Amino acid sequence: MRRLVICSTCKFSPESKFAPDGRTGGEILIGHMREALAERPDVTLETQICMWNCARPCSVVMQDEERYSYITGGNAPTREQADAILTWFDAHGATETGEVPFKLWPQAMRGHFIARIPPVKS
């Protein structure tokens, strides 16, 4: 199982919880990710209320049962960021361990990683 989990309550910007349209940054990023994943049955999208990473919104977790999982923050609530997250996650899925060589990282993903979590072994 491979899934993305995005915080739905992450603020829109450092200055404002809500965008001019009343949505949070997390809600906006979730919308963009749903569009990006519309024809991608290989990745599940889930939402989570507050991931306790308020200092670095928007928070996204990239989970995998067989490889390292990653926690990211400071993701912009834009379609470009959603595409960069998905591009990185595709590179992740193409590896045996989930360790993506830095040279393959989209520029928009650099500086966003907070933690790497090993897979649960049975």
Image (cartoon, rainbow, N blue to C red):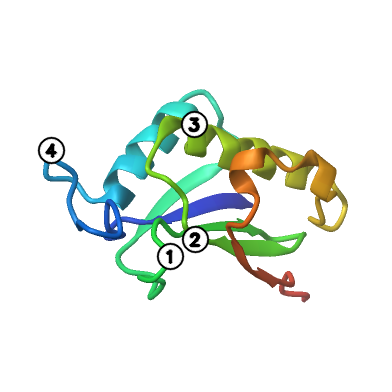
Q: CA distance from mark 1 to mark 2?
A: 5 Å
Question: In the image, 30: left or right of 60?
Answer: left
Residue assigned mark 2 = 73
Residue assigned mark 4 = 21
Question: In the image, 31: left or right of 91?
Answer: left
Q: Which residue shows up at 52% across the image and 51% down it?
A: 4
Residue assigned mark 1 = 56
Amino acid carrying label 4: it is: Asp
Amino acid carrying label 1: it is: Arg
Considering only vertical position in the picture, is 69 above or below 33? below
Q: Which mark is residue 80?
A: 3
Q: Are marks 1 and 2 in contact (CB under 8 Å)?
A: yes
What is the quadrant of residue 6 in the picture?
Answer: bottom left
Within 10 Å of disc 1 (Cα), the crowding (few <14, some 14-19, many 20+) is some
Q: CA distance from mark 4 to mark 2?
A: 22 Å
Q: CA distance from mark 3 to mark 4?
A: 19 Å
* Residue 21 x, y percent position in the rendering: 12, 38
Circle 2: element type: loop
Q: CA distance from mark 3 to mark 1?
A: 18 Å
Amino acid carrying label 3: it is: Glu
* Residue 66 x, y percent position in the rendering: 76, 60
